[in-house]
Image (cartoon, grey):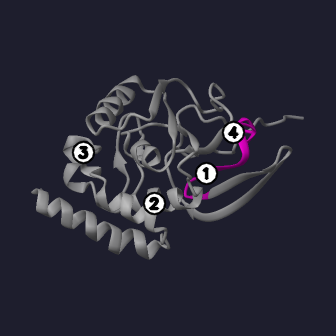
Amino acid sequence: MSPINLETARYNMVEQQIRPWEVLDQRVLDLIARSPREEYVPERYRNLAYADMNIPLEQGQVMMPPKLEARLLQALEIDPNDTILEIGTGSGYMTSLLASLGKHVYSVEILPRLNEAAEKRLSDHGIMNVTLEVGDGANGWDAHQPYDVIIITGSLPFLPESFPESLANGGRLIAIVGKPPVMEVTLARRVTEHSIAETTLFETDLPPLINARERERFIF
């Protein structure tokens, strides 16, 4: 695609996919409208950067469809002073959006090659308020807690308690919980020191986070 076609594709994505999907937060719309998603997409899928689809990464991981990324960002209500945890760096695109909205992002990726590629992309775009770490965050990542925002970019059969326990007072967490073909986007919010409120926002489908745990089954 030429630069003009990419700009047109980005505009059409916002107006035809994202805005009609109940994303009305102008900060989110403006951010996505100016963010070069094509530069975070694997080269062979560059022409599909603005399509309404999952874009394959390594080992069954994907970039979420743009409208899902936008809807999750809107639900998190990110403040410029927020400390953010992202589980699953992937391509680094969502990391870049989070970093543009919040104060600092700690992003954890289990696949070293994805981590290295994302680190280069973020550096190339001058995004410095991020700390990328390699590790298994499927059951939480408490190294820098408490977090104001937590986002998990792969689905989970259930939400481990360790994630909401890492939230600061007033903190928000987004997770996609369940099994295919129907999963629920769950928003958890720390209301008080000892209270978490959960809300189901909508249904979707997303490949699982690597090493996501199943619930233990009791055999009698």
Q: Give the mark nearest the N terminus, 3 or 2.
A: 3
Mark 4 and mark 1 lie on one chain; the one further toward the N terminus is: 4
Q: Amino acid at mark 1?
A: Ile
What separation in Å lies between label 4 and label 1 (alpha carbons)? 10 Å
- Residue that carries the numbered disc 4 in the rendered image: 163
Q: Residues within 10 Å of mark 2 (few under 14, many from 20)?
A: many
Question: Total marks drawn?
Answer: 4
Farthest residue to the left: give it. 2
What's the distance in space between the residues labelled 4 and 3, CA to CA? 31 Å
User: Which residues fall within the magenta stretch?
Assistant: 160-184
Q: Which residue is mark 2?
A: 70
Question: Which residue is drawn at the image coordinates 79% and 37% (left, top)?
Answer: 217
**In the image, farthest residue toward the front:** 81
Determine contact: label 3, label 1, CB under 8 Å.
no
Q: Amino acid at mark 2?
A: Ala
- Could you tell me how far apart the alpha carbons at marks 2 and 1 are, in whole angstroms? 12 Å
Circle 4: residue type: Phe
CA gap, disc 3 and disc 2: 18 Å
| Residue to which mark 3 is pinned | 39
Q: On the image, numbered disc 1 is attached to which residue?
A: 174
Q: Is residue 11 above or below residue 117?
A: below
Element at badge 1? strand
